[in-house]
Image (cartoon, rainbow, N blue to C red):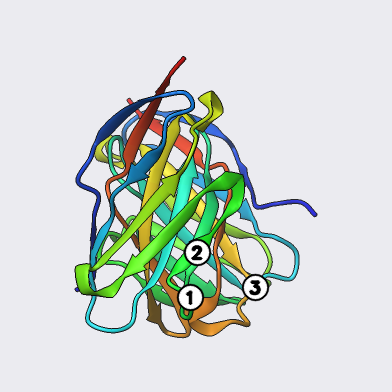
Amino acid sequence: AQSVTQPDIHITVSEGASLELRCNYSYGATPYLFWYVQSPGQGLQLLLKYFSGDTLVQGIKGFEAEFKRSQSSFNLRKPSVHWSDAAEYFCAVGLMTGGGNKLTFGTGTQLKVEL
Amino acid sequence: DTGVSQDPRHKITKRGQNVTFRCDPISEHNRLYWYRQTLGQGPEFLTYFQNEAQLEKSRLLSDRFSAERPKGSFSTLEIQRTEQGDSAMYLCASSPGRGGTTDTQYFGPGTRLTVL
């Protein structure tokens, strides 16, 4: 069965510093990978997705992620963090099921930004 | 373009009561998903609709849970005889349903259920 691991439960960075959030997946076929962000008490907002092609994916809010098949990773990066980026970040892998796309999520990484 | 909406946003109930949640997907989205998120965890898949047909149910969805999408538009999730372990955020997502595996899900704000 597919699974997603986010090894860092909490990360604290200073505003303006660079950020990398780790994500490792386990999946037998070509993975379809997503990063979502969740602010307190809110639903999930899609940051970016990878289906195929270029392994470096650009998303919204200045985020990017790189798919590395050899390392089974899909890490999220941002060169300069803003205070408004403080939130919880979820990596997910999509599995085709009955014609749909069922997502399996990691446990999330809580990002704190120090001013 | 309005996003996915869910109602209510918060629900507090006593153990043993029935509750029903509603999800309105993005207009013309064919697929609708329900997920459950407990504290400190990522969302977990519960069930999925293609138009009005419920195509898959997770083992997490016990007999006390039932979901419907009667006209292929909005969906309801009902929990009968609620238990304290049902306390969670219930998230709804919809997707266009035209992209196969590239179909992207858009999430609503969720319904926070607290069972006392």
Q: Please tell me whether residue B81 is drawn above or below residue A55 in the rendered image.
A: above
Determine the image quadrant of residue A5: bottom left
In the rendered image, residue A77, in percent from the top left (x then y), is placed at: 42, 48
Are the two marked residues, 2 and 1, in contact with CB atoms closer than 8 angstroms?
Answer: yes
Mark 3: few/some/many CA within 10 Å (<14, 14-19, 20+)? some
Q: Residue at x 53, y 52 (%)?
A: A47
Name the spot of residue A67 as percent of width and height, x first: 36, 67
Viewer-nearest residue: B109 or A65 = A65
Residue B90: x and y in percent read: 44, 46
Q: Position of residue A81 (x, y in %)?
A: 49, 32
Mark closer to the observer (3, 1): 1
Q: Quadrant of residue A75?
A: bottom left
Does mark 2 fall on the same chain as mark 3? no
| Residue beneath disc 2 | A57
Q: Is residue B34 above or below residue B28?
A: above
Mark identifier at residue A54: 1
Q: Secondary structure at mark 2?
A: strand
Question: To which residue does mark 3 refer?
Answer: B96
Question: What's the residue type where badge 1 is placed?
Answer: Asp
Is A115 above or below relative to A92? above
Q: What's the residue at 58%, 48% (across, down)?
A: B108
Name the side, left or right, on which B105 lies relative to B42: right
Task: Tell me the kind of residue under disc 3.
Answer: Pro
Disc 3 to disc 2, how far (Cα)?
A: 22 Å
Question: Whole-Å distance between the Cαs marked 2 and 1?
Answer: 7 Å
* Rendered view: A104 above or below A76: below
Residue sitting nearer the eye, A111 or B38: A111
Q: Secondary structure at mark 3?
A: loop
Residue at 31% across, 67% down = B58
Q: Chain of mark 3?
A: B
